[in-house]
Every structure is written in structure tokens, then in C-alpha cells.
Amino acid sequence: MFLYRLADFISWLLSLYTWVIIAAALISWVNPDPYNPVVQFLRRVTEPVLRPIRNVLARYQAGLDFSPLVAILIIQFIQRVVLPLLF
């Protein structure tokens, strides 16, 4: 029972983080104020995950940043494949 609740909690956290990534991507489309606390929070929370993905994708990019999409796909894979296998 505890493991199922733990899996649900982890899945909930991953879903929340997906929405944070989406919010950060949407805000990046406009010219946000870098001193805004919301913008600073979103960048501080998402950059540790998105930066390594950007480094890997840097060789293949054509001017678009696909790192949020790749991060969301990885999160979905973890939620739909890895968590059910673990629990």
C-alpha cells in the first residue's frame, strides 16, 4: 500500500514538474523581465534539467529549443513505463 502511494506521489510530482516546464517554455516566447520572481523561479527550477538536454541537442538544433519537449517526453516515459515497472 505504501509503495502505491509513493508511486502516486512521484507521478504527481512529475506531472507538476511537466507543467512548470510548460510555463517556463511559454514565458520564454515573450521577452520576460529577468528580475521578475516568477521568471527567476521558473529558470532556477527548470535549468538543471533542461541545460544537459540542450547540450546534447546543440549539435542537431536549427534555431529552435526542443529541450522542453524532450524533457516532457522523458517525464512521460518515466511515468508510463518506469514507475509501473518499479511498483
Image (cartoon, grey):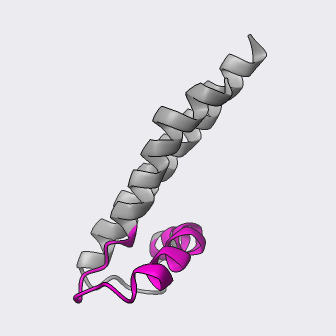
Viewer-side residue, 37 vs 30: 30
Q: Name the spot of residue 39 as percent of width and height, x first.
A: 45, 74
Residue pictured at 49% horizontal, 72% vertical: 50
Q: Name the quadrant of the N terminus.
A: top right
The C terminus lies in which quarter of the figure?
Answer: top right
Res. 78 visible in picture: yes
Taking the magenta stretch, the answer to whether it contains residue 64 is: yes
Relative depth, front residue between 82 and 23:
82
Considering only vertical position in the picture, is 51 above or below 9? below
Q: Residue 80, relative to residue 15: is it above or below?
A: above
Q: Outermost residue, right direction?
A: 2
Examine the residues drawn in magenta and state their main secondary structure: helix
User: Left or right: 15 with respect to 4?
Assistant: left
Classify residue 86 by image quadrant.
top right
Q: Is residue 79 left or right of residue 72?
A: right
Q: Position of residue 25 (x, y in %)?
A: 33, 68
Indicate the position of residue 34 as horizontal and vertical percent values.
Answer: 44, 87
Q: Can residue 23 be seen here?
A: no
Residue 32 in the figure: left or right of residue 36: left
Q: Looking at the image, which residue is at 23% across and 89% down?
A: 63
Residue 51 magenta: yes
Residue sticking out furthest to the top: 1
At 43% from the left and 44% from the top, the residue drawn is 76
Residue 82 spot, x, y in % from top left: 57, 37
Quadrant of the rendered structure where residue 83 is?
Answer: top right
Q: Nearer the viewer, residue 2 or 38?
A: 2
Stretch in magenta: 39-67
In the rendered image of this protein, does residue 32 appear above or below residue 25? below
Question: In which image quadrant can residue 65 be found?
Answer: bottom left
